[in-house]
Structures are given as structure tokens and as C-alpha cells.
Amino acid sequence: MSRKEIYAWCSLGITLSILGYYTITVFGLPVGIEAYEEQITGILWKVLAFAFLIELGLDLLNSTLLGGVAKDERDMLIESKAFRNAYYFLIVAIISVVMNVFISDFLSTASGESVLLSMPFMTLHVLVIVLFTAILIKAATQIFYYQRGV
């Protein structure tokens, strides 16, 4: 497993744990598993710390020139495909959220009741989740192409 692939796995772990903690904090857990909230958040914090320490160790190895590996064409190709996929998802998701906000605002003024995405705080939470999902797509694309051996 190359260092760039390890970085992608660490990025995936860090992003998943932050997104999981954010989701639990903002929306809470379903009724049946509320008692396990402390255990789940503890696991998320451990994953975050473990991935951070691995990434820190790799950065220290690269900075001391004990095994620093420069990016080659393969790494650049994989990274560009990952950024492309994340960018496409981000653009489509943001346009969808903006259109949904306009439609929700129109429906809430027409019906007189508040629709879910017409509330600004809910739109903010959806945009944060979309951003984290784009980062997950980038990391997953990198892992896919490294595993595939492109």
C-alpha cells in the first residue's frame, strides 16, 4: 500500500468520523439507540485520533526525508480523477439545494406553512453534509483507483 493510498484512507476515516459526530450532534440518534450515543461518539473520536496520528507520522517521515516519495504521473492522474468526481458531485448537489430552497420558499409562501428547507439553519446543515460528502467521494475515488492499480 503506497503512502498516497494511506493518506486517502486516513482522509476517509477523518471525514467519516467528523461527519458522524456532526450528524449525531445536530440531528441526534434514532429512538432505539439513544443509549449508545456515548459509545458511538467515543468510537468516532478514536477513529479520528488514530487516523490523525497515522497522517501525522507520515508527514513527519516525509519532512525528515526518511522515505519521502514525490508524486508521479499516476498519483497526479488519480488525484485529478478524484477531484473531478468530487467537483461534479458538489456542483450538482449545490445546484439541487439552491433549486430546492427556491421551490421550498415558493411553497411555504403559497401554503402559509414552513417547509423544511426554507429554514436557513436546515439549509446550512444540508450544505455542510454535502461538503463532507464531496470530501468522502474524493477519498473513495482515490482509494478505488489505488486498489485498482491504475
Image (cartoon, rainbow, N blue to C red):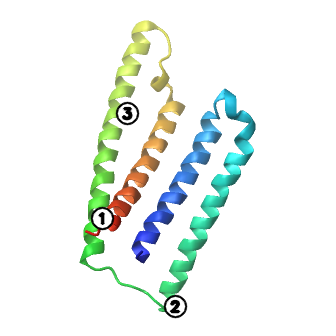
- Confirm or deny contact between disc 1 and disc 2 (CB under 8 A): no
Q: Nearer the viewer, residue 133 or 105?
A: 133
- Residue drawn where x is 57% and y is 52% of the image: 18
What amino acid does circle 2 point to?
Answer: Thr
Q: Which residue is mark 1?
A: 148
Mark 1 vs 2, N-terminal side: 2
Where on the picture, by quarter, is residue 127?
top left
Distance CA(mark 1)–CA(mark 2): 30 Å
Front residue of 55 and 33: 33
How packed is label 3: few (under 14 Cα within 10 Å), some, or many (20 or more)? some
Give neighbour class at mark 1: few <14, some 14-19, many 20+ (Cα, 10 Å).
Answer: few
For badge 1, the amino acid type reads Arg
- Of the residues tagged 1 and 3, which is closer to the observer? 1
Q: Label 3: which residue?
A: 97
In the rendered image, which quarter is residue 71 located in?
A: bottom left
- Mark in front: 2 vs 3: 2
Residue 94 picture quarter: top left
Q: Residue at x 30, y 64 (%)?
A: 148
Question: SS class of the residue under badge 2?
Answer: loop
Q: Position of residue 28 (x, y in %)?
A: 64, 35
Marks 2 and 3, how far apart at CA: 45 Å
Q: Quadrant of the N terminus?
A: bottom left
Amino acid bearing label 3: Val
Q: Quadrant of the C terminus?
A: bottom left
- Tell me what residue is drawn at x 38 percent, y 52 percent: 137
Point out the residue furthest to the top here.
111
**Position of residue 76 measured from the top left corner of the image (x, y, whole percent):** 28, 72
Query: Where is mark 2, residue-wise?
Result: 64
Residue 60 placement, left or right of 149: right
User: Element at badge 3?
Assistant: helix
Left or right? Give the position of 91 relative to 131: left
